[in-house]
Amino acid sequence: MAANSASPRQGQRGGQPILEMRGITKRFPGVVALDGVSFDVRAGEVHALVGENGAGKSTLMKILGGAYAPDEGTLLLDGRPVSFSHPWEAQRQGISIIYQEFNLLPYRTVAENIFLGREPLRRGLVDYGRLHRDTAHLLARLGVEQWIEPDTLVKDLPVAHQQMVEIAKALSFSSKVLVMDEPTAALTDREVDLLMGLVRQLRDEGLAIVYISHRFKEIFAIADRITVLKDGRKVGTVDASEVTPDDLIRMMIGRPLDAFYPEYARPEDIGSPLLELAGAGNDVLDDINLTVRAGEIVGVAGLQGSGRTELLRAIFGIQPFTRGTMRVRGQEVRVRSPLEAVRLRMGFLTENRKEEGLALLQPVRDNTLLVHRALRPLLARADGVLSVAQLTGRVDLRAAGLHQEVQYLSGGNQQKVVLAKWLAVDADVLLFSDPTRGIDVNAKAGIHRLIRSLARSGKAILMASSDLPEVIGMSDRILVMWDGRIYGELPAGATEAEIMALATGQRKGGRSA
Amino acid sequence: MVRRVPPIFVVLLAICVWISLLNPRFATVPGFMSFLMRAAPAAILAAGQLFVIVAGGFDLSVGSLITLVVLGSSMLIDGDPANTAWVIAVMFLIGIAVGVFNGAVTSWLKVPSFITTLGMLVTLKGFALLWTGGAPRGFLPNNFRVFGRNRLTGVPLLDEVPYAVIILLVVAVVATYLLHRTGWGKQLIALGDNPRAARLSGVPTAKVRILAFVASATSAVIAGILLGGFSGVSTNVGDGQELGAISAAVLGGAKLLGGRGTMPGAIAGALTLQALFTLLNLLGWPKPLRDGLQGVIIIGAVAYTAWRERRS
Amino acid sequence: MQRKEMVALVLAAALLLSAMPQAGVAQRVSEFWDPDEFARQMALLEMEPVGPPDKPWLQALDPTWVDTSQYKKDPPWTICFSNAGLFNPWRVVGFTTMQAAVEANPLIKEFIVLDAEGRDEKQIADIADLVASGRCDLLIVSPMTTAALTPAVERAAQQLPVIVFDRGVNTRAPITFISPIGGYAFGAQGARFIAEQLPNGGKVLALRISPGVDVLETRWSAAERIFAETNLEIIGVEFTNDDRAVAKSIVTDYLLRYGQIDAVWMDAGATTVAVLEAFEDLGYEIPVFTGEDQQDVLVKWYEEGLTGIAPTYPTFQWRTAVEAAVMVLSGQPIPGPEWKLPQPTITNETLAQYLQYNMPPQHYALCGCEDLPGYPQRWGGR
Amino acid sequence: MSGYVIRKPGRAGLPPAFLFLAGAFVAAWVLVSLFGRGQFLSAANISNIFVRSVALGIVAVGQSFAILGGSIDLSVAHLISVTAVMASFIMQGDPANIARAIVVVAAIGLGVGLLNGLIITKLRVNALIATLGTGLFMQGLLSTSFQNFAGAVAPEFEVLAYGTWGPVPIPVVVLLGVVALGALVMHRTRFGARLYAVGGHAEVARLSGLRTDRVLIGAHIIASLSAVLTGLFIAARLGAGAPWVGQDGVYDLESIAAVVVGGTALAGGRGGVLGTLAGVLIFSIMDSMFNQLGTGAFLKQVFRGFIIIAAVASYSVRSREEVG
């Protein structure tokens, strides 16, 4: 199908946009997520949407999909103004979206997920035969039929296959507009190629496609136009043929990449090993060997499902290691629960700050002191002696006061509260997983500086991230994972290409500085 | 803690003023004391229930535990005042055991507390009746009943204060301290707000939760002693108390499934329900209609809270 | 803003609460009122029973006899019993007596009991179970509610000899229905006593256990008639659910609302002491009251020199049911289709003879159990 | 990754609760044979076990829908009382009124279900509080208006409770019919698929374009209608309805217990009505067993509570999530 991709694009290029978003503004408590953004897409075109994490891409697409209502601005579909108060309205109008977070029901089958709410009927009842056939058909079209059975429960599928189910689900709508929000985040190169072919095919069939990705390679391979968002504002829309990746980067971050990240560790910063793993593994990880020293930031890169986040969760005792040895500050330890990790003065911060980091209804103060309290006798007085103001000052928290509920803080400030929580107990082995995901650019830089200053102050930091520039910009060493193992190690300043080669299992080993 | 005055206090005050207009005796010290005395078991129970509710759970077993305490006490004491002290101690031990069981099954076997305590509601009532053969046996001597029935005399300014009111006051102060001023209380609220975050912050979730159920069960034992004292032995003394306690906590601004709730609010919620029933009684409402109105009121209170939260 | 909202809400609530009419409390004519039966019971009260004078549970008032020779069967027998439940002390004392009476009789080899836990629905299934088991020589039923159990008892009576006691059924299918004189007599005695004791315009509070049970409904409907003929003021009729805490709260509510109550009429004695305590605890004189033959009532009444009356609904009828079953299976004629047992009334004059300080507070003086094996420990006595 | 668990939808295997059911059955059989009196395996006894299951079974099927959708319905017991009273009050023993009575109580059920659903979805009131509130309200109105058995059902109507169809009691046919219909709706209709989605993850369902509010309201209407059917059955069984029949049967908590013992997750999204049937039958087998063993009702209650906890623990114990 990829063979006839010399497509008749010219005909549609000048065509009317099938979908137009004008002056979209969306505010969340403490942050303007989108500020007057306009965007359009035409039938038979792939329009890439790029921007740093937190630039507003996902919010824009959630508005398009009816999941959020915009505060200002209008949506035009085929030139007619529309407004969606609920996702089903957007769907009915022919807009389908593959969201970044998985939107599948783990305890339902692939087929039931794909045709959720639109199951084929015969005499009023769900026609499981046809449901099965239609699903098989769709999976075949994606070229994944040998891996994914229509009747498998989604929870039993590996992450990459779940992503393919998401794509199949979006395709099943036969919509006019298809939005793909980072569809390749969990895919191997082979699967990415497959997807690219499919996107071209759909485009040629006249679909309007909005394609969101961090990967320039994909963008330049399939996009006709590119719109760049930054800090919730639109920087511009350009023809893909008229720009280079460097141009895009400049548009996205507004300054050269190296100015954006703090300096790497100096040799004098590095101290003794605080965290060591040897031959560690569990049901998803195997043969993990690593050392993190005081003062250094060790990055962990890898595709979704590579074991990158699972590694941190294992170290922190959430899904503990079942074999191998682990040493903290030279002492051999076993960590079977987060409480044990906390007692060893380890800290954990994830991108899911709302699910895993914060008690949203509680004030800044109680969140900051949560770990501190967990380590003290239960009936000890709640306030203790810690100066919360000092801690929040140290992370440069911007809040209306220590009594403000954290649900009303911006993402960056929420993440700072999580950090302050660990500083309160003087944790010196810090595990970060996508620490800046969903945070606006300025706050992001602030958090990066903070992480580096923590390292400087003698903390050992293990940072997993899906954001390659972040891994490259922050890490003093980079571990690359694939299939539950550490596939190689790269020195500071490795290139994206080097990382990806390891992360997709094409190469093994790595290089030293 | 919440800075502004929770609406429940305004409502409570309004109802109390209204009752006083209809029945001036209510506004006198003895009148108000006897109101507090009757509300004390429910208020204590609501205070205990709040520990579990803020942690994201329910304790439906308290009603049956009350029945067990009343029936068991009368069985064991059997009218002999010399037995009262150790029997009360045994009752507290039973309460603690029930609380530990509820909390442990919920934490370690992952049975939702609604189900765990529903099971205990059935089991404890069955056990109490099995023990006594289905009807009250023995009887409660005066030195047991004094807590729920009598008054402390010679109190300056107030003259007479029912023991139940003193106990309520002590429970209220201790419970408020525990929930709002200790690390445990704060961890409990964080656990109810976001269990995953609490666990990842090192909160010993099982221990914290088990203690909440122990607190709730202990409050049921106290309420049982007061109720048994107030009116003597009966087999259905605890029936439905659990729903009353949950309603009271919710009226007081607690959020079901956890993360929000204040002790003064929950106690005020229980007092408000009691005041409302007193008011409706004075207005001549028949009992079934009073219960019916309670239904409307708790829906209204929760809907109002939800609406206010969405708006802000 | 918020304060305004609150005020508006409170005002709206106030309007609503006051405007709400005292809905639905209009008294309907009780479907349980039967003037002929009332007259008959009042007559029975005056009558001398036939039967052994020292065994009131074998006495009968104005009996007619039914022939039971067709049910004669060789012993030993299996007797089955469908019990409505053991939800109050009266039933527990009665059931204990019943079990002891069974044990005392060597001709009964097995006594199968199903407890309906107070649910009509379960008792219907229980009776079906017992009939289907094919093991019962005779079935005793103590029905939960009259109307609901009638069809089940009718069905059972087609296959087995059936004896019903306590609460009745609306059918003549059972061989006999054992009960004391009845609810009209019970209710009327208390009401008449109150009417005699109180001045004109006296305030009376009536407390009932629960609606829908014939033996209780008749008590109130008789009392209601009698009160209607006086100029006493009935300030309320409430259901206590047989719960002392509820009873005490209700009385406290009424005392707060009316400031004075001159008499409390009760359709049973289980909550009597709690009711009297409500007066004590608020510092009121204990008024004229009606009770029953529980020891706690009798003791308080006696020791504090109160003014009261205690009609009884003797627990010895549970023993009568067993004796009747034995008579039927032996082919002896028994009183039927109604077996009216005597129903003594305890008054201030006769009170002393019913006091049994060795028995527990919830023991009924008229248990008819003193000669049975295990007395008094089996009933909780010393 | 060696082979996925393959599940054929629409022909879903028997839920694990049937294992417990089989266990309970065998245990009861053995115990009754050893220590009891009477025949556990007799046709009459088996038939009785089913008849005992009817009232709870029907309402538990409806409760399954509410719980599967991540909600709960505490108002069913009160609705059962309302239905039983209204049905017999309207019928007044006259067969000509049967149709009218059924229409009226069905309309009441529809209204109550709709009201519950609207309060939960539109006013965002926690389902527990919402249905507790509507239940109290209904009971208040009912108990104010009726203090006793009201009217009588028509004798013809009692067929629903006492009739037989060949050797099979009609109530059992009705119960099995309701379960079959419930299973059909749950597993073979779009509504059923949507309900699983809403209960499994409401936000995923919403983003997948489902109108989750409507689905939840639908589930509550089903729960209420099944309560109405139980109310009609009880009225037929007792010959009339009284305002306490629902509460005395504790149909609210018992139906929830039956549903979760049957393997439906209290949080929603997993389970089904077949499991619920198993849960109800387990309770009935216990009733029958304890009857035949001659132990009292109270010991049974003690066991019953533990069985609820143990059954749910067996489903939940491997979960890693925190539960509250």
Image (cartoon, grey):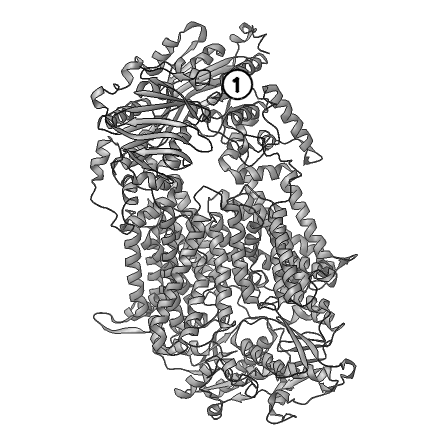
Q: Secondary structure at mark 1?
A: helix
Up the image or down, D44 lies above or below A324; here it is: below
Q: Which residue is mark 1?
A: A191
Q: Position of residue B214 (x, y in %)?
A: 37, 57
Relative to residue D2, is residue B13 drawn left or right? Answer: left
Nearest to the observer: residue A451 or residue B296: A451
Asked if residue C96 lies left or right of residue A493, the reply is: right
Q: How many marks?
A: 1
Picture residue at 49% right of the left edge, 75% below the top: C207
Q: Residue A278, can we see it? A: yes
Displayed quadrant of residue D280:
bottom right
Q: Position of residue C259 (x, y in %)?
A: 38, 75
Specify whether residue D225 is in view.
no
**Quick check: C179 above or below A313?**
below
Q: Nearer the viewer, residue A42 or B226?
A: B226
Question: What amino acid does circle 1 point to?
Answer: Glu
Q: Is residue C13 above or below residue A383?
A: below
Q: Residues within 10 Å of mark 1 (few under 14, many from 20)?
A: some
Q: Position of residue A228 (x, y in %)?
A: 40, 15
Q: What is the chain identity of the residue bearing mark 1?
A: A
Quarter containing the N terminus of chain D: top right
> Quick check: A252 left or right of D56?
left
Please tell me which residue lies in front, C220 or C49.
Answer: C49
**Residue C35 appears left or right of B266:** right
Residue D2: x, y in percent? 57, 30
